[in-house]
Image: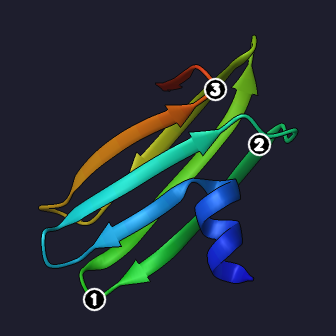
Amino acid sequence: AAHVIYRDVLGIYEIDTLAKKVMLRFADLPLESCRGRIPTDDGYVYVEWRRENGALIYNADAPIGYTLHVNALGVEARPG
């Protein structure tokens, strides 16, 4: 259940610690905001998002050396 919440609600779709890549995938959900973090051996992956004027505004942070990749499904998502 926790995996589904992190993936489908928070938006942390996949963490590949070997490739040092974090895949974020945001969906159009009936929530106003969400935030959370997941530990890795290299540090935490942190994501928070909120709705603002019909868009999903997100902030994300990953351990040093990791890259973030964002995909939005049916919602306008932009960093903020």
Residue 79 as seen in the image, left or right of residue 48: left
The answer to whether the residue labelled 2 contacts the one labelled 1, judged by CB atoms less than 8 Å apart, is no
- In the picture of the structure, the residue carrying the numbered disc 3 is 74
Colour logic:
rainbow
- In the picture of the structure, the residue carrying the numbered disc 2 is 33
**Badge 3: few (under 14), some or many (20 or more) residues near its Cα, within 10 Å?**
few
Disc 2 from disc 3: Cα separation: 16 Å
**Badge 1: few (under 14), some or many (20 or more) residues near its Cα, within 10 Å?**
few
Give me the residue at 44% from left, 50% from top: 24
Compared to 77, does 6 lie above or below? below
Compared to 7, does 55 lie above or below? above
Which x, y percent locates residue 69?
Answer: 31, 44
Q: Which dot, 2 or 3, sits closer to the camera?
A: 3
**Badge 2: few (under 14), some or many (20 or more) residues near its Cα, within 10 Å?**
some
* The label number, if any, that marks residue 41 in the structure image: 1
Compared to 41, does 63 lie above or below? above
Residue 53 as seen in the image, left or right of residue 45: right
Mark toward the start of the polypeptide (1 vs 3): 1
* The label number, if any, that marks residue 57 in the structure image: none
Give me the residue at 12% from left, 61% from top: 65
Mark toward the start of the polypeptide (2 vs 1): 2
Residue 40 as seen in the image, left or right of residue 78: left
> Could you say whether the residue bearing mark 3 is in a helix, strand or loop?
loop
Which x, y percent locates residue 79?
Answer: 45, 28
Q: Amino acid at mark 1?
A: Asp
Which x, y percent locates residue 46?
Answer: 48, 61
